Image (cartoon, rainbow, N blue to C red):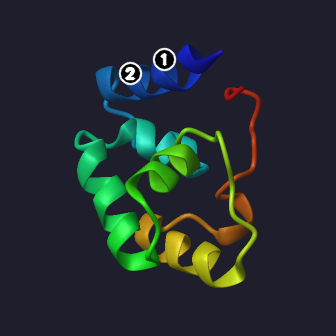
């Protein structure tokens, strides 16, 4: 199931479609430098790199409104959609 988001992103890149990630998982998958994303989350939200990575891979999620707001500001994704599953993540 993880390949679904990757396929969508690849197809969008190949067809020059403007692709907008719908949640944190898709946002992280579309980033070329995931380490830089994890570091930015770590620095701005005062969490560990491991926590940032686990959020981006949907292993864990936060319910802290302040952290959700900060993640939303970093990604441009509405806070209510950051951890919302759209059927392409497991």
For the point 64% across and 58% down, the residue is 82
For the residue pair 17 and 34, the one nearer the viewer reads as 34
Image spot of residue 40 (x, y percent): 31, 66
46 to the left or right of 81: left
Task: Identify whether 9 is placed above or below 56.
Answer: above
Residue receiving disc 1: 7
| Image location of residue 31, percent across then percent down | 32, 43
As measured in the structure, the alpha-carbon distance from the residue carrying label 1 to the one carrying label 2 is: 5 Å
Point out residue 11 in the picture as x, y percentages from the top left corner. 42, 20
In this figure, which residue is indicated by the disc labeled 2? 10
Are the residues tagged 1 and 2 within 8 Å (C-beta)?
A: yes
In the image, what residue occupies the spot 35% across and 54% down? Answer: 38
Given residues 9 and 23, the one toward you in this image is 23
Circle 1 packing at 10 Å, graded few (<14), some (14-19), many (20+), is few
Q: Is residue 19 above or below residue 71?
A: above
Q: Is residue 82 left or right of residue 25?
A: right
Residue 34 badge: none
Q: Secondary structure at mark 2?
A: helix
As drawn, is 90 to the left or to the right of 75?
right
Residue at figure coordinates x 51%, y 78% from the top left: 70
> In which image quadrant can residue 66 be found?
bottom right
Please tell me which residue is depicted at 70% across the width and 59% down the height of the picture. 81
Residue 19 appears in which quarter of the rendering?
A: top left
Tag 1, which secondary structure? helix
Query: At which x and y percent is residue 42?
Result: 38, 66
Mark 2 neighbour density, 10 Å: few (under 14) some (14–19) many (20 or more): some
């Amino acid at each position: 199931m993880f390949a679904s988001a990757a396929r969508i992103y690849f197809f969008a890149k190949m067809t020059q479609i403007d692709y907008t990630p719908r949640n944190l998982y898709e946002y992280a998958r579309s980033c070329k430098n995931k380490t830089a994303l994890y570091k930015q989350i770590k620095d701005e939200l005062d969490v560990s790199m491991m926590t940032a990575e686990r959020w981006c891979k949907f292993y864990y999620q936060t319910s802290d409104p302040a952290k959700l707001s900060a993640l939303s500001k970093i990604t441009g994704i509405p806070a209510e959609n950051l951890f919302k599953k759209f059927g392409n993540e497991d």
